[in-house]
């Protein structure tokens, strides 16, 4: 790995890229306004700022888009792409802006494409257990809308996230232990390519072995290969019953070791989440009223979610109890209300942390994933190292699939502190790679982890990705500056 992540990267290839200048970008926006309607284009400074910066991220670019445009149909998106491609104007898709690695930032300016007007459920096929949606559909709304049919889309990133962004980051969340990640739930995609061509990656059956798997090419591509304008998603049956248990441990290593043992036991848990002592203290001090009904032990805690039939859950819970027995005391929810309150503690954690952030500090939140057998070791080492920085630093994670996150709050004006945080993140990435892990379990690469991706995959693999990118986007106008450089 190179010199380690820096806080605000300057793209080394910036000078070599031949993009339109600002006035030409405005001309493109003007042409787009004529194609899709004046009301669907904004130059408002606050709007540009909102679409160019994330409070959740350290990997922000100082550059903003020249305009934000709001298509309503695939044909609108195709018109936008044709105009931008002809004038060499970068296009950056924007869902809800909840990604955290600078994925939707605009280091080369250009046109930001906001999908909030493409938020329709196009077709719901309960008998086939799938749904066709526009990219701006929010996953919480989708699940609310289809719940009556006993089905749900089992991905759970930020509650604000939209299907287009979720597909493009190959997101997951607490449900991934049981249900896998976004790539496992996408049947087909309608995609607008850089020159405006509209393609559909495959048809709607559950399986096919017809041709290249182009669907997977676009899942996780962060909008660098094409713009998703429709997605057909598989759906899962809502489990008959669920339950939650929590268990506190004396050390983070013990908690992570117990998590590894539970994973290897083969018990089909719905989720297995870890929160460290820092997070648990925050819950006691700043959690919502529901969460503060309980006095939490301020120790590393596993949150275990069960799902299935009521009898199945009883049997799974008994087996989990046997595995944990001796090392710690499991507490099972005694009512549906308590189950909700216990799980709310895990779900609220990140929001609570950001809300209590000292004024002027920034958050550096990052994730890695490793083979399960190395989980306890990497969490222990990472927690120790970031704990020594003398700043707010906390470990939280979807440990059920070997994925964990570290969040640190630092003062961006304090250069020494920034360097120390960067070093800590860099060491965590290096450790994950030494353990045959990945530098990004679920947040994708964005601008924040480009160097690390080279370390993870090597130049030849990145070289093939570059060849694919050039083939579909020869002018390199689709979300440039992300994933890897030209
Ligand atoms: C509180 C919080 C909790 C989170 N928890 C999780 C978690 O548990 N698991 C997880 O995986 N992530 C999590 N995230 C990260 C984030 O929610 C996910 O990355 C999510 O998938 C982003 O969706 P979005 O709609 O906000 O996309 P955006 O952030 O708007 O965009 C993400 C990327 O997708 C591209 N894009 C957007 N729409 C399209 C489109 N139509 N076509 C092509 N490209 C497109 C963008 O250009 C960008 O590169 C969390 C974030 C927050 C703030």
Image: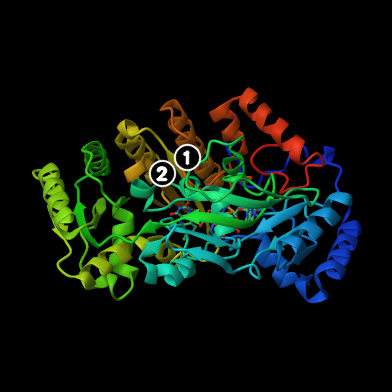
What colour-coding does the image apply? rainbow
Report if the CB atoms under discs 1 and 2 are less than 8 Å apart: yes
Give the quarter of the figure containing the N terminus.
top right
**Measured along the vertical axis of the image, is residue 470 above or below residue 103?**
above
Residue ID at (50%, 65%): 124
Q: Is residue 122 left or right of residue 155?
A: right
Task: Locate residue 469, reporting x and y percent.
Answer: 71, 37
* Element class at badge 1: helix
> In front: 121, or 315?
121
Residue ID at (60%, 69%): 119
**Across the whole image, how many numbered discs are drawn on residues?**
2
Q: Of callouts 1 and 2, which one flags the residue occurring earlier in the amino acid sequence? A: 2
Res 342 → quadrant: bottom left
Task: Locate residue 277, reporting x and y percent.
Answer: 28, 53
Res 466 → quadrant: top right
**Measured along the vertical axis of the image, is residue 269 above or below residue 437?**
below
Q: Is residue 461 left or right of residue 246?
A: right
* Element class at badge 2: helix
Reading the image, the residue beneath label 1 is 424
Reading the image, the residue beneath label 2 is 386
Q: Is residue 472 left or right of residue 26?
A: left
The residue carrying pointer 2 sits among few (fewer than 14), some (14 to 19) or many (20 or more) residues within 10 Å by Cα, namely many
Q: Is residue 50 left or right of residue 187?
A: right
């Amino acid at each position: 790995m190179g010199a380690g992540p820096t806080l605000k990267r300057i793209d080394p290839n910036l000078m070599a890229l031949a993009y339109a200048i600002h006035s030409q970008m405005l001309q493109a926006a003007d042409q787009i306004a004529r194609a899709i309607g004046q009301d669907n284009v904004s130059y408002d400074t606050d709007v540009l700022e909102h679409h160019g910066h994330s409070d959740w991220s350290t990997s922000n670019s100082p550059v903003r888009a020249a305009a934000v445009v709001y298509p309503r149909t695939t044909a609108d998106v195709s018109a936008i792409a044709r105009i931008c491609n002809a004038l060499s104007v970068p296009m950056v898709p924007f869902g809800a802006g909840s990604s955290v690695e600078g994925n939707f930032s605009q280091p080369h300016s250009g046109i930001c494409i906001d999908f909030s007007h493409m938020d329709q459920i196009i077709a719901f096929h309960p008998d086939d257990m799938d749904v066709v949606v526009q990219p701006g559909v929010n996953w919480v709304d989708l699940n609310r809308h289809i719940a009556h049919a006993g089905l749900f889309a089992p991905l759970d990133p930020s509650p604000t996230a939209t299907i287009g962004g979720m597909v493009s980051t190959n997101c997951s969340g607490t449900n991934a232990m049981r249900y896998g990640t976004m790539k496992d739930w996408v049947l087909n995609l309608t995609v607008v390519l850089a020159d405006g061509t509209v393609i559909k990656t495959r048809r709607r059956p559950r399986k096919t072995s017809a041709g290249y798997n182009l669907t997977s090419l676009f899942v996780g591509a962060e909008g660098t290969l094409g713009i998703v304008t429709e997605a057909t998603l598989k759906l899962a049956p809502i489990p008959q019953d669920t339950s939650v248990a929590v268990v506190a441990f004396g050390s983070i290593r013990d908690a992570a070791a117990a998590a590894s043992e539970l994973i290897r036991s083969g018990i089909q848990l719905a989720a297995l989440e870890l929160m460290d002592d820092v997070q648990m203290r925050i819950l006691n001090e700043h959690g919502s009223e529901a969460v503060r009904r309980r006095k939490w032990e301020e120790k590393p805690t596993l949150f275990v979610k069960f799902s299935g039939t009521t009898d199945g859950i009883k049997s799974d819970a008994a087996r989990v109890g046997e595995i944990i027995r001796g090392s710690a005391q499991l507490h099972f929810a005694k009512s549906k209300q308590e189950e909700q309150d216990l799980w709310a503690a895990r779900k609220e954690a990140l929001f609570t942390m950001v809300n209590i952030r000292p004024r002027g500090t920034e958050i550096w939140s990052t994730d890695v994933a490793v083979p399960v057998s190395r989980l306890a070791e990497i969490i222990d080492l990472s927690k120790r190292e970031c704990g020594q920085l003398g700043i707010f630093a906390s470990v939280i994670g979807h440990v059920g699939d070997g994925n964990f996150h570290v969040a640190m709050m630092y003062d961006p004006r304090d250069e020494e502190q920034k360097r120390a945080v960067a070093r800590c993140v860099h060491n965590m990435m290096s450790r994950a790679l030494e353990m045959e892990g990945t530098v990004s379990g679920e947040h994708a690469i964005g601008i924040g982890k480009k160097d690390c991706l080279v370390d993870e995959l090597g130049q030849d693999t990145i070289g093939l990705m570059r060849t694919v990118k050039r083939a579909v986007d020869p002018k390199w106008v689709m979300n440039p500056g992300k994933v890897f450089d030209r």
